[in-house]
Image (cartoon, rainbow, N blue to C red):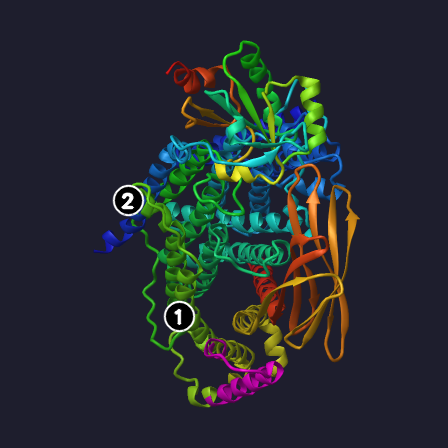
Amino acid sequence: MKKLLDILPLVIFVTLIIVLFSFLSNEDDQLETALIDESFPEFSLTSLTDKTKVLTKSDISELPALINVWATWCIACKVEHPFLMQLKEESILPIYGLNYKDNRNKAIALLQADGNPFEFSIFDFEGRLAIDLGVYGAPETFFIDKAGLIRVRHVGVIDDKVWKEKFAKYLDE
Amino acid sequence: MIPELGHITLIAYLVLCLVGGILPLAAIFFNKAALEMPIKRVTSLLFSLITFSFLILIYSFLVDDFSVAYVAQNSNINLPFYFKFAATWGAHEGSLILWILAMNAWLISFIFLTKCKNTDFLNTVFSISCQVMFAFTLFTLLTSNPFERILPIPPLNGADLNPSLQDIAFTIHPPLLYFGYSGLLIPFAIAVAAMLFNTDTKEWASYSRPWTLLSCSFLTLGIALGSWWAYYELGWGGWWFWDPVENAAFVPWLLSVALFHSLITSQSKGVFGKWSILLSILAFSTSLLGTFLVRSGILTSVHAFALDPERGLFILGILAFFIVGSLIIYSIKDLNQDNSGTYELNSKEFGFLLNNLLLVILAISILFGTIFPLIYEAITDGKQISVGAPYFEIILFPFALALGLLQGIALYLSWGSSSSFSFIQRVFLESISVFGLILLILYILFDNLYLTSFITIFLACWIAAGTLQVSKKRNINYWSFLKKRLAVTFAHVGMAILVLGVGVVSSYSLEKELILAPGDSFEFGDQIVSFESVEDTLGPNYFSKSANISFKDTQNDTNVITEKRTYVPSGQLTTEAGIIMEPFQDLYISMGDNLEADIWSFKVQIKPFIRWIWLGALLIAIGSMLAGIKQIRRA
């Protein structure tokens, strides 16, 4: 009996660690499934380059497409920028930008300096659309299929490897 | 080049920790004197290395080296220099370095200040600490290297420090908390060494006690500062939210309090030895668990760091290795730790036992409430549930009541049995003082009565009276006796003040949402609140709307500013509450939304006695700090 009591803390802790572990390992999937196969949320926000122009969901007209969340303060976005340019130059699919909690002038200046991979960028200063999308931060990329449904969500930098593993197969569908 | 120096130093530190984690143990268990290390020198060297590495990181912040990714993500050219300095520990990577630095600081203090002739024991404590520091450093280097560069083209400016962290309390809240958490490493390492050598309970308890007290003191300060920061920075006027991360700090705090009380018994009477060992392991493991919860992204909270499952896995690995490892030793080794002391129900031993049971069950209940949503989600395959403040409050109340009642009589108890002590006289005296104190407090507050606040006011008075009157059981001068027991008096009276603050603020607070245009006034409690004007102001890295508000009552007319700030680099909004502090109440106003033109919504609150909560916590921290220092001197 006394020995049993000595082992008890060990048993409890091991159980706890297993629970936490199992939760960690399926964390990744859950993050992605939240919006999968839902249609892209409605929004009404101004265009980055034109303060007076209001953009809505219907402006994302060419499908399938990528929606890329970016900002000038986001370091990783700079890393991913050349790859987005490459997608644009090879005309693989249209990319729409979601400029997230950013300074409008700085963002325009950056696109002029480094090149603009986007058909247009939605200016989301307060992060309203980002909240609907459940954005964690920039960069983040969504793939929308022909029917307007979100099929892939990727948190972090998108590069050649990520593109091939996660996105390419949906483009062929 | 300079950041690489920091990186290389960190790698050197890692290697040295590994050596220190293996050699001394090998020397002991294979009985090879040749492998022994001069641990004082090695500890000093380790400390210099990690300090140097940390200084380099600070330097990178101060000179705006945005080629360092961590700096670029957490600083900005326009950030004032003191926030650049504090930004060093503003996010995951830098705070890990600070954490390791803190562990090393504790280790060096322990090694140099503990007068222990048993070198094997000291070497083992050193070695185990090195292993933990090794694991944390490896974690830092592999998953969260703060010296990582963005090359070849570094950004011209950084993304800025999270605006709500740009605050003076924040600059000191995390270091204090990290020192508190990491200090629990020492009792843990001592407990493991005590198991390995089956050291005499009284002996190892005397080594462990000061460090437990000091960690607890730092934890208290850290938690209190965090609570204070949340109060005025988040703009809600609350002081405790039962946020998972707050709980993750509260649980080790409860366990460290339980531990040093249990260690008193172990050191004085040689009993509860095994229990103290188990508690040491639990306290350290919950402090690691807290780190895991915050940094794995497994729970979402205002404190959440970068989300990265890989990091979570690594910390879980560290947790599993050290805690499961020590618990295996605990379960298989025949520990000869409990002297067969006998004690009665009215003894000090039994008092401590009760105190420990209550604290530990409370800690486990809070821990359970914190991770239950995860377990529930795992069992039900993704259904979500949230455990909020009501659960925790229902749990806390009876335990706090029982602990407070116990605390009020605890100091009268003697070892073995307290039969020589006349309880009837004591209780009579105490009742009179308690009654007097309650009347005094009600006189100050004046207004209506709530049952819950009545109970907490009673409890606070009970603890205070029980602490302050204790000397009369012996025939010595009251003040010189109190001076002798300065530490415990501070800590216990602090607890009384804290309980009083909590009780009053939770039932006597007033709160109202107002919509005001400049020139409008509103009657609120005994105050007349007027919105005088609103203007645009400009800070170093933000612009803001600041409203000038006046509070008027029969005697005073005070003005206060509340702001809505927009931080330029990130575009984030923060609210700066306007607070008028008075000894018995806070007048609190925070700016809400801009409805049209100059019309704003405001949240006004009157928070009686809220300052007493932090005052109480401060006294507790001072008390345990004094006790810790006294124990180090005595050892």
* Element at label 2: helix
Instruction: Tell which of B618 and B409 is nearer to you.
Output: B618
Question: Image height check: is B535 above or below B47?
Answer: below
From the top left corner, tell me how far across and down residue A165 is, in percent: 41, 17
* Residue B66 falls left or right of residue B462: right
Residue B394: percent from left, percent from top: 40, 66
Q: Which residue is mark 2?
A: B379
- Let me know if residue B449 is in the magenta part: yes
**B628 left or right, relative to B82:** left
Pick whichever, B161 or B316, lies toward us: B161
Q: Is residue A74 above or below residue B556?
A: above
Check the image and name the residue furthest to the top. A90
The image position of residue B605, as x and y in percent, is 62, 67
Q: Could you tell whether B149 is left or right of B138 in the image?
A: right
Nearest the camera: B243 or A135? Answer: A135
Marks 2/1 same chain = yes
Q: Which residues are magenta?
A: B428-455
Q: Which amino acid does the dot numbered 1 rest on?
A: Pro
Placement of the C terminus of chain B among the 4 image quadrants: bottom right
Q: Chain of mark 1?
A: B
Q: Amino acid at mark 2?
A: Ile
Q: Can residue B93 be spotted in the picture?
A: no
Residue with the mark numbered 1: B398
Q: CA distance from mark 2 to mark 1?
A: 30 Å
